[in-house]
Amino acid sequence: MLGEFMVNPATQDNKVISFLIVDAFKASEQDLDANEEVNVKLFDFNSLDSLIQEKKITQLFTVSAYLMAKNYLGSLS
């Protein structure tokens, strides 16, 4: 687990927990329920910093998870 944070503690009591999976791979095609729609987008980890700065990625959960992963991986060096 990389870390966790509250989504919006002023109005909500839920939190996001972020995990880092190293060497993940696609094992099979999606098997979704009839009412599910999931779109997976793959990005090179090293390109995320510039995509965030260019405001091409603005979602709080994604930015937070990226920063936690970057800090974790940097601590391994």
Image (cartoon, helix red, strand yellow):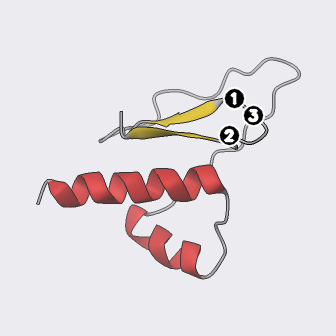
Q: Are marks 3 and 2 in contact (CB under 8 Å)?
A: yes
Q: Residue 43: percent from the left, percent from the top?
A: 51, 60
Q: Are marks 2 and 1 in contact (CB under 8 Å)?
A: yes
Give the side of residue 40 with respect to residue 33, left or right: left
Look at the numbered disc 3 and give the secondary structure of its residue. loop
Look at the numbered disc 2 and give the secondary structure of its residue. loop
Q: CA distance from mark 2 to mark 1?
A: 6 Å
Quadrant position of the C terminus in the picture: bottom left
Q: Which residue is mark 1?
A: 13
Instruction: Classify 10 Å Cα crowding around label 1: few (below 14), some (14-19), many (20 and above).
Output: few
Callout 2 amino acid: Pro
Out of 32 and 49, give the one closest to the viewer: 49
Callout 3 amino acid: Gln
Q: What is the residue that sits farthest to the top in this orientation? A: 33
Q: Which residue is mark 2?
A: 9
Image point (53%, 27%), residue name: 28
Image point (27%, 51%), residue name: 72
Q: Which residue is mark 3?
A: 12
